[in-house]
Amino acid sequence: MSEEIPRIDQKCAMIAVIGAPNAGKSTLVNALVGAKVSIVTQKVQTTRARVRGIAMENDAQLVFIDTPGIFTPKRRLDRAMVAAAWEGIGGADQTLLVIDAPSYLAGETTGGQAGKSRSDTDRIIGGLQKAKRKAVLALNKIDDIARPKLLALAQELNETGAFTDVFMISAKNGDGLKDLKNFLVEKTPPGPWLYPEDQLSDISDRLMAAEVTREKLFLRLHQELPYDSTVETDDWKQTKKGIRVEQTIYVARDGQKGIVLGKGGETLKIIGKAAREELTELIGQPVHLFIHVKVRKGWSEEAARLRNMGLDVVE
Ligand SMILES: Nc1nc2c(ncn2[C@@H]2O[C@H](COP(=O)(O)OP(=O)(O)OP(=O)(O)O)[C@@H](O)[C@H]2O)c(=O)[nH]1
Ligand SMILES: [Mg+2]
């Protein structure tokens, strides 16, 4: 039996995308892949597990590892998320640090979310320096910042010595993405592709379906509820009429179930409708979605829950 010999002109790189919560990592990965592989919301800590998004550029396969925002962990879930982010860097050929430029600047003088985002980012830069690992810097959200301020910030960050190159981008409107992608392709070493060329991500349909519902939940609910909840796909069946999907939303406290359901089940209905519509589009056939809500105190400490989202358990 002959083994498949890779074509000599194949090139492949793993690129870890890291940064503080809300920097725009998932938006960037989706834009570079050209499809939605990772969920995006305006809230911090949206991404929980590592998701790989795959982009093809002629002979080069770029495998982007979208990671959870790195922050100070408290719960077992949070520790597993932080570990997943740092591990993402481990085997990667390149590390791409994404910074929310407007918020990083605002964080110098104000506290709150911007201040936190800045100190999280500084901690990551410190971590890179300690690991003697140079990264490519992507200053993001340039659609939302004045040019002189941006240039001064680029220079300030460049002086940390933590970066090999600096790019100024808007993951949202596409500015600068072509240059960044060309640069990454140029740096890609020869090697066999890791995935078939038409594959866009490494997560299963079941996990993607759970993520889509979690995105709608995050968009709809506020305060601590998103962080106190998770979604799992329990069943996935092909029927004559399409795909039948059963899911459970777990919340941490009794009162939260009522909030997810809403008056007369109205909130859950809205979340379910939005998730079903997006899934139907993604899968390309009708989806029948059934969502249950369960109270499960301490789910964020449960190893089984974390494994279901693709995280390793950290003590
Ligand atoms: N104005 C502007 N907003 C952006 C840009 N890129 C991302 N955003 C917004 O920033 C918010 C966070 O984006 P995400 O892609 O979820 O950020 P993330 O870094 O993956 O966040 P976590 O998964 O929570 O760590 C969303 O509301 C995006 O629409 C950009 O270039 N410009
Ligand atoms: Mg994300």
Image (tube, rainbow, N blue to C red):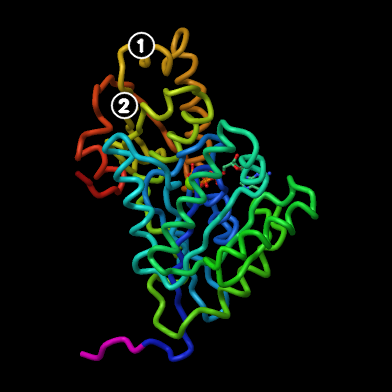
- In percent of width and height, residue 128 lies at 44, 62
Residue 227 lies in magenta, yes or no? no
Q: Residue flagged by tag 1: what amino acid is it?
A: Gly
Q: Residue at x 29, y 48 (%)?
A: 311
Front residue of 295 and 205: 295
SS class, disc 2: strand
Find the distance from the CA under tag 2 to the CA under tag 1: 12 Å
Residue range in magenta is 1-5
**Horizontal arrangement in the rendering, residue 141 relative to residue 264 (left or right):** right
Q: Residue at x 40, y 30 (%)?
A: 227
Circle nearer the viewer, 2 or 1:
1
**Horizontal arrangement in the rendering, residue 132 relative to residue 97 (left or right):** left
Front residue of 162 and 80: 162
Front residue of 164 and 223: 164
Q: Residue flagged by tag 2: what amino acid is it?
A: Tyr
- In percent of width and height, residue 28 lies at 58, 55
Q: Is residue 165 above or below residue 239?
A: below
SS class, disc 1: helix
- In percent of width and height, residue 120 lies at 48, 45
